[in-house]
Image: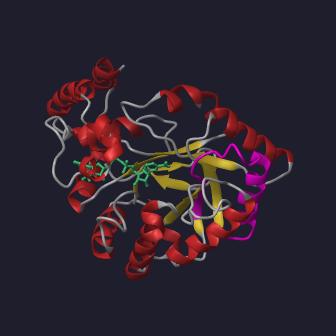
Amino acid sequence: MEMQYRRLGTAGIKVSTLSYGSWLTFGTRQAVEQSIECMSAAYEAGVNFFDNAEVYAAGKSEEVMGEALRQLDWPRHSYMVSSKFFWGIHRDNPNAHFTLNRKYLLEAIEASLERLGLEYVDLIFCHRADPDTPIEETVWAMSDIIDRGQALYWGTSEWSAAEIRAAWDIAERHSLRKPVVEQPEYNLFHRERVEQEYARLYEDIGLGLTIWSPLASGLLTGKYRDGIPEGSRGEQVEWLREKLTDPGANAKVAEFMAIADDIGCTPAQLAIAWAASNPNVSTVLLGASRVEQVQENLAAMEVLAELTAERKERIEAVFG
Ligand code: NDP
């Protein structure tokens, strides 16, 4: 199946069903050359959204993506780029990290645009909620960034349903730009927030979703059943190791792999297709450390086209 495009919630903009993100790859394991290779493969398959964040590789991920975009020279109307703010990269300053205060946000967007070499980004996210800044202050700042032309839409990442609704209500009350999108984790091991907590928000405020870690950082590919493979994310990121090598989780993955085998696809493709089959998901953010992974994962569109109710029930029986 060719790439499909879905509206970002009730916003007018359409994102490709599968999109591509740069966490833990761009600016760390991938230099510009490999990033160009991966972005090109995605773009040629119809991907129109590339996800980034200020904090990824402490700004280097944005620099690498910016350089890749400069060399690729795609028409600006043909792709979307995001950035996200919260953790900050100036850790020595109390006002510039772990915050969504106005000063930080207005300065952070400027620095991101400079690293990306772009006049504007398409989406900006509050990368986490900040209990120390009034939501109203953050909503005004995000709205102002859009009014200044530095971003087109804004949203949140891993905010509670109550926080998202509070932000939306403030924007409504003051005729400000509303948050239109949330970026939560969503995969077969992590479903509650997307399927239950946010359930009312899709219809009530038209929330779109750009979901992350569809493979649970690689766990759902089956690569961690016999320990941590060399060069994998599990080797790279210590705090993920326990989760990736959990015997109970890997036993489920083994059952899941048998379903993929029966269908004739890879477990990565089936896990991605499963996430994309949720109609509230606007786009599934793929992560990939090599171009072969990008290619394999993009072929999940074929698996999605044939993800019948019966197949989903088999998956549900393993993870439900
Ligand atoms: P995944 O869960 O899909 O994990 C991607 C990783 O799994 C790859 O880097 C690779 O790691 C491994 N992998 C991918 N495909 C395959 C394959 N076919 N076979 C074997 N291994 C494979 O997604 P991410 O966790 O990377 O999330 C996707 C994007 O979402 C990020 O890039 C980022 O843009 C965004 N994100 C947002 C967050 C937020 O807080 N808003 C948090 C996390 C991510 P390796 O080869 O190194 O083992």
Is 135 magenta? The answer is: yes
Residues drawn in magenta: 122-150
Q: Where's residue 127, x and y in %?
A: 57, 51
Q: Quadrant of the C terminus?
A: top left
- Front one among 101 and 50: 101
Q: Could you say which quadrant of the image residue 212 lies in?
A: top left
State the residue at coordinates (24%, 50%): 235
Is 238 magenta? The answer is: no
Inspect this view and state whether residue 305 appears: no
Q: Where's residue 276, x and y in %?
A: 40, 40
Inspect this view and state whether residue 153 appears: yes
Q: Could you say which quadrant of the image residue 39 lies in?
A: bottom left
Look at the picture and state if 138 lies above or below 291.
above
- Front one among 47 and 51: 51
- Front one among 253 and 201: 253
| Total numbered labels placed on residues in the image | 0
Q: Where's residue 311, x and y in %?
A: 28, 25
State the residue at coordinates (42%, 64%): 57
- Left or right: residue 37 compared with residue 62: left
Coloring applied to the structure: secondary structure
Look at the picture and state if 154 lies above or below 134.
below
State the residue at coordinates (49%, 27%): 192
